[in-house]
Image: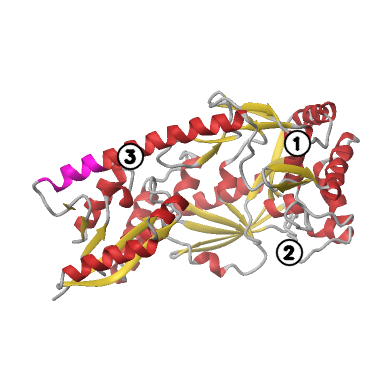
Amino acid sequence: MKKRVAVYARVSTEHESQINALSNQIQYYDDILKQHKDWKLYERYVDEGISGTSINKRINFLRMIDDAKNNKFDLIITREVSRFARNTVDTLQLTRELKKYGVEVYFTEDNIWTFNDDDGELRLTIMATLAQNESRKTSQRVKAGQKISFENGVIYGTGNILGYDKMGKDFIINKEQAEIVKFIFDEYLNGKGCTTIKYECEEKGYKTSTGLSKWSSSYIARVLRNSFYCGTIIYRKQYSSNYLEQRKVTNYGEVDNITVEGKHEPIITKEDFDKVQKMLDEKSTKIYMNKKQRIGVPKSIWTKKIKCQCGSSFHRRIYHKNAYETTYGYVCYRRKQYGGYEIRKKRGLDISDACNIKMIAEWKLEIMYSVLIKYILENKKEIVGAITEKIATSNNDKKIMNYKNFINKIMSLSFDLDKEYFLNNFINKIIVSDNEFKWYLNEIDDEIIIRLFDTYNSKEVNIEIYYPTINVRAKYKY
């Protein structure tokens, strides 16, 4: 019986693609296969233009691992360790995982077979460490080169900036778009907010830098915060915190910004830009988190769980405020960004995908939480019994494991349990919807999905709780 073989190839840069074309790599592997008559090609897995430092973005690589788990082939051949992964931990964990599935990896250039117990893993560790170290050095060289580019005012990215056209390396003012930028700054200086300005931009038929006719409050805010319009370029607003993950994170002061004066013509005066920044700062809430100063409204555990019927997440906002207390509510992100159904209709704007879900008072969510935990505690024996019956009749190992995990969670429940722990470990989603949402039920694993019917009557809460053994419909008045 022939050995089933998978081929993995990766081309990470444009330069490498020119020197070592993908077709040449494929031919390289085909030649190896011809030398082994007892091998049969199962599939070629190829990732193009993807970095090897982290496996998370390599779709075909992950698909290959999943196929190995399902016993679709016996051997993976790849050119060298650096093509497979440049992260030592990933390399060792993955090859050990593949070994557990009965799949060997053959690194042809390094002549390493992972089933070679004599020195296979030792040599693999050494080569993976060297590859990871080379990635670290490459990252350092790139950062050093970027710093010089920053100091010379080189602009990174697509160059898609409202008010400018990119001509080669230079930015030339687009007169039509520049008038839109001036309008936004002037209106804000005249006391109008981002939401009002976004509606006015749509009413005037203005287009965004990408040609969209629909504007959002966050887009207006980004224009107002962009120092490029007054001639100043600020670098390192985001940075890569770890060369292994290569994930961009917002810079809250962890690394120094680099500020230079650009060579482009400004649209806004520095005086007006500084006035706008001061006005924006006065309207923002400063939050201190681990010595990082952030701007915005504090996040809540609820924002991670609530989903609107339109598919958007919810943001926490002030609901009521007086001299004695401040209460909060949650608003749909789509509604917050583009405006609600009612106001868009009133202004004569497009309402085709407008959201009509209004702000949800936080106290309703607190009642919902109390109802759920009370129901589970009062019916603990019945719920556990129903789940036990499902375990006895199920042939799905994954579901059985999920049911058992849920039983363990229920048995540890008490009234004084931390709310955040309960929400994170029991609640999958809280759907705010007046429509059917069967497509959400497919996501049920070992957690609960709640459907919250908000009638917008401040004295009433309607909920339904879904789990394979829980089907509670409750209507509670405040």
Sequence-wise first label, 3 or 1: 3
Which circle, 2 or 1, is nearer the viewer? 1
Of 336 and 235, which appears nearest the observer?
235
Of 207 and 230, which appears nearest the observer?
230
In which quadrant is the N terminus drawn?
bottom left
Q: Does the magenta stretch include residue 124?
A: yes
Identify which amino acid the numbered label 1 is placed on.
Answer: His
Question: Is residue 399 among what the camera can see?
Answer: no
| Residue drawn at x 58%, y 45% as measured from the top left | 302
Label 2: which secondary element:
loop
| Alpha carbons under labels 2 and 1: distance apart | 38 Å
| Alpha carbons under labels 2 and 3: distance apart | 47 Å
Would residue 202 be found to the left or right of residue 223 on screen? right
**Residue at mark 1:** 264
Sequence-wise first label, 2 or 1: 1
Identify which amino acid the numbered label 3 is placed on.
Answer: Gln
Of 103 and 233, which appears nearest the observer?
233
**Residue at mark 2:** 353
| Alpha carbons under labels 3 and 1: distance apart | 40 Å
Question: Is residue 440 among what the camera can see?
Answer: yes
Mark 1, other Cα within 10 Å: few <14 / some 14–19 / many ≥20: some
Sequence-wise first label, 2 or 3: 3
Mark 3, other Cα within 10 Å: few <14 / some 14–19 / many ≥20: many
The boundaries of the magenta stretch are 119-127
**Residue at mark 3:** 132
Residue 150 in the image: state x and y as whole percent. 60, 31
Q: How many labels does the image show?
A: 3
Q: Does the magenta stretch include residue 228?
A: no
Q: In this view, does 449 lie above or below 178?
A: below
Mark 2, other Cα within 10 Å: few <14 / some 14–19 / many ≥20: few
| Residue drawn at x 33%, y 65% as measured from the top left | 26
Residue 292 in the image: state x and y as whole percent. 57, 26
